[in-house]
Image (tube, helix red, strand yellow):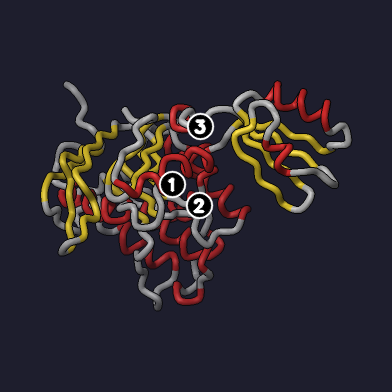
Amino acid sequence: MTRQPAIRLTGLTKKFGTLTAVNDVHLTIQPGEVVALLGPNGAGKSTTIDLLLGLARPTDGSAELFGEDPRHAIVTGRVGAMLQGGALLPTTTVRESIALIHALHKHPLSVEEAMERAGVADLAKQKIASLSGGQMQRARFAVAVVSNPDLLILDEPTAAMDVAARHSFWASMREFTDRGKTVVFATHYLDEADTFADRIVIMSQGRIIADGTPSEVKSVVTGRTVSFTLDSADAASLQRLVGVTHLEQRGNRIILQSEDSDATLRALLAGYPSATDIEIVPRNMDDAFMALTGPSTSSGTEKTGASK
């Protein structure tokens, strides 16, 4: 028997008056995938999440979770969600908040395991109202995961977390995905998407403009970045070095985008032997994101270099 996709969006569209927030989105995510949903503010990410969770009705098209209506999949405990606007009762303790959701499901994790996974065991007796922003995010994660869902939807999960908490969160997430669970997360931290996602979906102006592995998405930008320190130099002459396509200067730090980093480096050292602290790195997810969602997309033209 063929497994149903964890998520299937077909022609999904949502309009608010004259504004089209989500525009004819088609997306299929299979069980076990870890998918990052990226896009600039206003791209339609949060609205898409609301639609696939049944929190809003589409103007056109449909959303299915495991072949079912989203609300049915959620009621049966197959879906957990951690949303930016997800409120917890301020007068309850962390443990009480998790226990409330635990009681609603047939095959949940224990409250203790959910707290351990979310890193909030030490906050069990603390009132929700007293939590910091990062602690609140971890409490929301515990509430999302306690039903032992097959699909976890996370909207900006590490917002307000410090670096240590972010690392702890993703370590816990690896344990979750290692069990074959499906995870979809929206984030502004592009390094998280690059590191933890199997697949990246980028939205802009309500449409999907790229869909592929991190490597496939990054392949829309070619070449490497050559950066170095130079006390005095004519920026115009550096711009003319072999292979250079773009130059940025930050004080005495020069950053060159090059289509042929080997040729650029040879020309740099021949013309500017006093250059120091030279670094050569591949173009990263930030570069690809900017290339795909930059000003040229405002005309409505889709950039499909990484699309499937």
Name the residue that disc number 2 marks.
Answer: 116
Looking at this view, is 211 or 55 the one in front? 211
Quadrant holding the N terminus: top left
Residue type of the residue flagged with mark 2? Glu
Residue type of the residue flagged with mark 3? Val
Q: Dividing the picture into quarters, in which one does residue 3 lie?
A: top left
What is the crowding at mark 2: few (fewer than 14 residues within 10 Å), some, or many (at least 20)? some
Residue furthest out toward the right: 274
Picture residue at 50% right of the left edge, 52% below the top = 116
Q: Position of residue 306 (x, y in %)?
A: 39, 30
Q: Earlier in the sequence, mark 3 or mark 2?
A: 2
Q: Position of residue 158 (x, y in %)?
A: 49, 55
Q: Position of residue 273 (x, y in %)?
A: 87, 31
Name the residue that disc number 3 marks.
Answer: 221
Residue type of the residue flagged with mark 1? Gly
Q: Earlier in the sequence, mark 2 or mark 1?
A: 2
Which mark is in front, 3 or 2? Answer: 3
Q: Does 295 sit left or right of 30 as displayed? A: right
Q: Earlier in the sequence, mark 1 or mark 3?
A: 3
Looking at this view, is 68 or 289 the one in front? 289
Looking at this view, is 204 or 186 the one in front? 204
Q: Which mark is residue 294?
A: 1
